[in-house]
Structures are given as structure tokens and as C-alpha cells.
Image: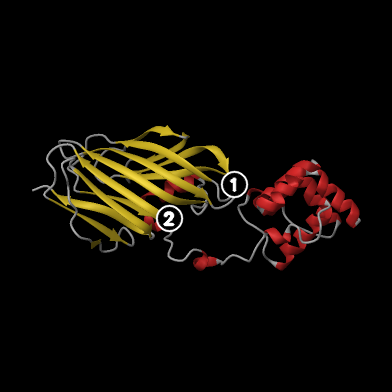
Amino acid sequence: MSADRRSSLLLADRELRRLLRQGTFAQVLDHCLNAHGLSLKRLQQQLAARGVRISRAALSYWRNGRSRPERDESLRTVRALEDLFGLPESTLVSLLGPPRPRGRSAEPGSVDRKRMWPAHDSLLTSLAAPADDRLRYLTIHEHVRVDADRRLAEVRTRLVVEAQRDHVDCCLVYQWVEESELPQLVEPRFCRLGRIRRDEVAGATVCELILDQRLAARERAVVDYTWRFPAGPELTSYHRRFTRSARELVLQVGFGGTAPVHCVPYQQRTPTATPRQGSPLWIGMSNTAHLVVEDVRPGIVGLSWEWD
């Protein structure tokens, strides 16, 4: 295709020009497929006619942002896509940026989800759960209510999340109890409840929350939900688990009856690691303990208290 013909096609497609300025590789690929009326099967065939072999699964992953081309043979495919779609040379290649780190170093300090939530492993498998690096948790605001009988009654949570790739439309939330019946997730806001998996013996629950909108990379969303707990044993601690870093955690524990005599924050790397305690917290007239942590590292952050 001549350079003049390529320029004419580009000028005629306003949305494509916008995506090339502000969008991602996945968004541009998706737009070009739709604009040319191509299915992944037909695209695969046209690439094969140019001597380029690639699976439909790989093309699908590129299209939805689950992965991106980085190897030499993949970049050859991208250049063939530029020619097929009539785009100027390096138009798509320039959207890829530098190669991402691979393996364990892809996100320094992260903790494997199965290690952080060992009781939930079979539930995640049954859900065919996607990787948990699709969303970054920017802010977590959690309010825990302990009733007058010193039992956990409910946990209200607000999450501010940011998509780390395109086409993210859900998130998974977890709950674990040691000596009581499983809780119920209620009052989802800015999302709806999707699939639920429970394991009564392990005390584990996983719920899927479907976001109000499908997110592109770097887009953000707010999610609210509440866990309601049946009557259980006397509660002496509560924590939040992080497989990846977060910008801020606000943890409040409100006591419905007499306040504890002593309350301290703690952190630990994994559920089996030794906790590291911080300085005691003040519990004011509201009978509420507040903990604010910025730049949360992967691991566990919580509060523990003594009643008498």
C-alpha cells in the first residue's frame, strides 16, 4: 500500500487518530479489527498469507490486553499488522513501549495469591480465576463493626481500583473465618454480585464483583460492599491481606459495647510469619480505633486488642 493511501486512511478515521495519541496497543488493535470487519480467524488467515504464523489465542490476548507482543517473532507479526491495516510503519510498535520484566521480578515484593489465601485455592481453581495483577488497589477503606457481645458483626469496604490492562470488568474479593459460619456479601454498590464459591470446612469464601463498566488500562473505579457475619466467637483481631502493594489503607474498628483496654496494629509478611506489632492506638469517645497506612507493602496489616 502506498504512503499516500496510508495517510488518507488514517486521516479519515478520527477515532483511530485519537487512540494512536491516547490509547493502548490493545485498544488500537481492537479498533482496527472492528473497522476492517475482521474476526480473529480471518485475521489469522490473512497473516498466514503474508508468511506470519500466530495462534488465535495469542491474538485474542493481545486484543484484550492480557498480554502484549515482545519477542522478535511477535514484533514481526505487529509489523505485518501495520501493513495489513494500512498503518504507517512503526505505528503499532511505538505503542508497545519497553519490554516488561518477566518471571518473579515482574512485580518486586508481591506475594503469590495461593500463599496469601491458602484456604481459597480450590475455590479459585473452580472459578478459573484470572491473574490478580489485572487491578491495582489504590485505596482500601474498611470499617469493622464489633457488636456489644464482642463478636464480629459486619465489615463495610470501599475499594478504589485501577486497571493494569485493558478489558478489566470484574474483581475478586475474599473472606476467611476460623470458627464460625460463613458470612454473606451484601449491598454491592457501583458493581453487581457475580459468581460465589464457598468452602464451609475451610472457612473460605470468594465472590466475584462485576464492575459497572469495563475498564481500559489506567482507568479507575470505585466499589462498595459489605460482609455480614453470623454470631461467632469473641473477636480479638482483624486484618486485611495484600498480595500486591496499595497506595493507602484506612482500617477502622468500632466497638458496640465496652471498648478494649489495649489495641495495637501489626503487620506480617504471610499468614504463617511472626507478626510485628506497632505502638498502641488510642480508642476515643466513639469507641473506634483508627489505623491509616500509606504505601502498603504486600503482606498482612491488622489490629489486635485485649478486652480485659
The colour scheme used here is secondary structure
Q: Amino acid at mark 2?
A: Arg
Q: Residue at x 82, y 44 (%)?
A: 12
Asked whether, in this view, residue 8 is left or right of residue 131, the answer is: right
**Measured along the vertical axis of the image, is residue 32 above or below residue 102?**
above
The residue under the point 48% across, 44% down is: 171
- Residue receiving disc 1: 216
The amino acid beneath tag 1 is Ala
Quarter of the picture holding the N terminus: bottom right
In this rendering, is residue 72 above or below 120? below
Labelled disc at residue 113:
2
| Residue depicted at x 58% and y 51% | 165
Horizontal placement of 18 versus 170: left or right?
right
Residue 136 in the image, given as x and y percentages of width and height: 48, 52
Furthest-top residue in this view: 187
Q: Residues within 10 Å of mark 2 (few under 14, many from 20)?
A: some
Q: Which numbered disc flags the more N-terminal residue, 1 or 2?
A: 2
Q: Nearer the viewer, mark 1 or mark 2?
A: 1
Q: Give whichever of 261, 172 is nearer the camera.
A: 261
Image position, residue 4 (x, y; %): 90, 54
